[in-house]
Image (cartoon, rainbow, N blue to C red):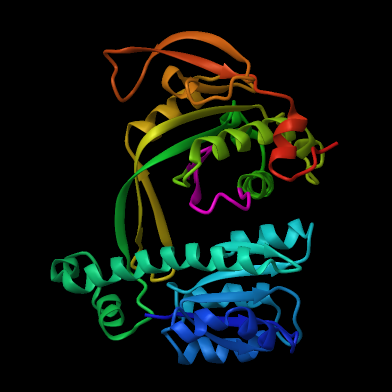
Amino acid sequence: MSVNILVVDDETDLEALIVKRFRNQIESGKYKFSFALNGIEALKKIESNFDLDILLLDINMPEMDGLTLLTKINEINPVLKAIIVTAYGDLNNIRTAMNNGAFDFLIKPIDFKDLETTIDKTYQQVKLLKEGISKIKENETLKMYVNESTMNYLLNKQGIKDEWLTENHDGTAIFFNLINFSPACKTESPDELIRFFNYYFTNLSVLLDVPDAKKTFKKIIGSSVLAVSVDAEHFRLSLDACLRIRHAMKTLIQRYPGKINYSPKLSIGLCSGKVTKGFMSRSTHTVRENLAFGDTIDNALQFAINGKENQIVITEDNKKLLPSNYKLEDLGKTQTIGDPNKLVNIYNVLGPSQEEIFSRMGMSKPN
């Protein structure tokens, strides 16, 4: 079965270039491309073709830009996944796109080898969604849990929006805990709290979304943020993200444009192991709920809540995964939620130099 890709870009020569570069894949039936020159034209094609799998979407276009189109596609076909194409260093648009549901992004000029890799990885997510939808259609007992209009839409449209799928993975969970945030909730206005948390979360997301972390999701839980990665290099990518975020936290807060009587302090819990990860949809049709549970998630939460400012807390088992040049602070022993009868050694990761961490990810250290 071909991967159906809609390329949306106002550069008229891009179609010929893609057809030339992917000639073998097109001839073999691996890829099937269609093209649109702006968001309005693309929207019409999305509405009329529920077989589309991937949207390769330029941000800057006439008539309707890529960010505007991105906000509309989930209501039409939530299985369709978008890969954003943007200019180097355009972090604001990347952040907005990722928050609006983009699956991944590429930087211009396009590296076609990287594009092919990104398409293949994105299609794996689309494939999982379709498999989950197929299971729902076959399971009549789900009618007890969704309303009639939802079920009718589910059975009669290819753009089905009720989904349910879980899988077991080796992965890494991170909890980012804002220490003593609750007292601020009693004194600050709701508008200012939401403004602050949105600023904090969106900037955190940018630092988490590195190009090779293809399988990461993020979720707000209370005053904490959960991130779960099941990428092939999940531990390394997650640890590097923790070190970057810890270093960048002070700068982020200094640049906060609002006024809040709260000085944020961050503690981080990190744990690698078995993770049950998946998703389910709500009966509203448009919201997909990411799920993650298991001892690995619980332990990361416990380490974050009990951790002190600027600590990245890991276990003895995860210590063995660290490069030899990492420095650690021994925090002693603790019980875990997963096995309260067993004491485990925990450590604070001091890490290598910040320059090394940012350099390894192809990023410049913030001033």
Residue placed most toward the observer, 190 or 262: 262
Q: Is residue 220 magenta?
A: yes
At a point 42% along the width and 68% down the height, the residue shown is 126
Q: Quadrant of the N terminus?
A: bottom left
Residue at the farthest right position = 367
Say which quarter of the image contains residue 260.
top right
Q: Nearer the viewer, residue 294 or 3?
A: 3
Residue 286 appears in the figure: yes
Region of the chain picked out in magenta, as a range: 209-228
Q: Position of residue 336 (x, y in %)?
A: 36, 20
Can you say which quadrant of the picture contains the C terminus? top right
In the rendered image of this protein, does residue 136 appear above or below residue 77?
Answer: above
Q: Residue furthest left?
A: 141
Q: Position of residue 358 (x, y in %)?
A: 73, 38
Query: Is 346 left, or right, of 241 in this rendering?
Result: left
Camera-side residue of 64 and 260 = 64
Q: Is residue 5 visible?
A: no
